[in-house]
Amino acid sequence: MTSEASAAVPPPPRPRQIAAVVAGNALEFYDFVTYSFFAVQIGRTLFPGDADQSLMLSLGTFGIGFLSRPLGGLVIGRYADRRGRKPAMILSFALMGIGLVGLALTPSYAAIGMAAPALAVTFRLIQGFALGGEVGPNTAWLLEAAPPGRRGLFVSLHAATADAGVLIAGLVGFLLSTTLAPATFDAWGWRAAFLLGAAIVPFGLALRRTLDETLPPAAGEVASGPLRPVLATAAAGMIVLGAATIANYTLQYVTTYAQTTLHMAVNVAFGATLVLGVVSVLCDLAAGWLADRFGRKRTILLPWLALIVLAVPAYLFVSALRTPTALFATTAFLSLVHILGSTPAMLLVLEAIPARVRAGAMGLIYACAISIFGGSAQPLIRKLIEWTGSPLAPGWYMSAAVACGLAATFAIRESARPSRSL
């Protein structure tokens, strides 16, 4: 196991280097939200069939990208453990650009027939592979480049910039939908959104070439060693990150939940999404700072206990009142306790993995958590509400998942010492 006290820490990274690293996190969630926002328009343009069929094909293609994430996490992560974090992050970011630009420039189904959906699937698989391979090297670099006593804050930048990507995507979608004529918006508004995201890739690649390498020299030499010593940590980490993923995707369901279950207006539903994004960005950084001050497990414990106990009452509150104020307050509270526990949870798992396999193991664990638990969360929530007829189903699901995640944290050894005690 590694520790802050014994690990060799490079000079503090320059701000532009940090920006180059965290740009990948922002782009990951920008892509996620942008595709979700424009799924209808993408379906009409690239897929055959009526409105319902093309939408289902569009959403199915979006889901296909999740299938290649674990492979990307393993392949690019292992490359990072053998050759270094820097070349791996350059590779993953370049592949992200190919996926974004390729999808944005794919001709319509009307122009090239079935080649259009085939190209869309290909580019989403490339994108999923790249996104799966980004997380391991990215978080490993942030952890290893952090000055002593600031690992939590540095790793929290991963989550904060991911949430910032959600906000930026929402803003871009809102601006395009309000400034373009409906016909123009449907025809190429979604293409513009993806190209805007891809525009940062050349700058990000140039900045990533200036990164200092943080992989310890001896780690690359033994990266092919046995994985058995970290299997127990990986199994527990999968449960922990799976719980955090379920909580996150349940909260991101708020837009649909507000419209379909609470029967609120669209602008109110999107307002709740904005609340979720703002609170998440602020709490990510606060959670990282708290984890440095008081330790990883202590910082996880109270927020996740609050989420376990209060998730169902929170949904009871908002479903009883069904007002914008109740929706915004509930979203803010659940986001607060989720983030304050989930950000240190990711740090706990990351630190428990030895440097020699850190990027590969973390990339695979995270990609599997996203693919399995993230990809299934929202469809399962919809089914739970249908089966039970209860608006409280998301709360029960979140509470049960986080309870499992909290229990799994006790199977992971905390390697870093807090800077002060409670």
Image (spheres, rainbow, N blue to C red):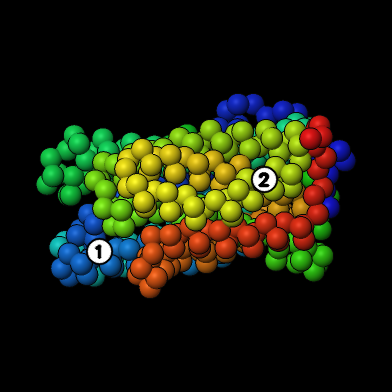
Q: Is residue 319 left or right of residue 355?
A: left
User: What numbered label is drawn on residue 302?
Assistant: 2
> Quick check: 323 above or below 79?
above
Please provide percent x and percent y for residue 224.
Answer: 77, 63
Q: How far is mark 2 from mark 1, CA to CA? A: 41 Å
Residue at (39, 70) in percent of width and height? 388
Residue at (18, 34) in percent of width and height? 179
Of the pair 108 and 312, the residue shown nearer to us: 312
Please provide percent x and percent y for residue 382.
Answer: 37, 65
User: What numbered label is drawn on residue 55?
Assistant: 1
Of the pair 311 and 89, the residue shown nearer to us: 311
- Element carrying mark 1: helix
Q: Is residue 149 left or right of residue 138?
A: right
Quadrant into which the C terminus falls: top right
Please provide percent x and percent y for residue 416.
Answer: 81, 43
Say which quarter of the image contains residue 20.
Answer: top right
> Quick check: 383 above or below 278?
below
Report the residue that reaches farthest toward the bottom.
387
Which kind of residue does numbered mark 1 sit on? Leu
Report the residue that reaches farthest toward the front.
320
| Circles 2, 1 touching at the beta carbon (< 8 Å) | no
Q: Is residue 64 left or right of residue 403?
A: left
Would residue 224 be visible to someone looking at this image? no
Say which quarter of the image contains residue 21.
Answer: top right
Please provide percent x and percent y for residue 398.
Answer: 52, 58
Which kind of residue does numbered mark 2 sit on? Leu
Q: Residues within 10 Å of mark 1 (few under 14, many from 20)?
A: many
| 2 vs 1, front mark | 2
Of the pair 100 and 176, the residue shown nearer to us: 176
Among the two numbered marks 2 and 1 on one chain, the one whose residue lies closer to the N terminus: 1
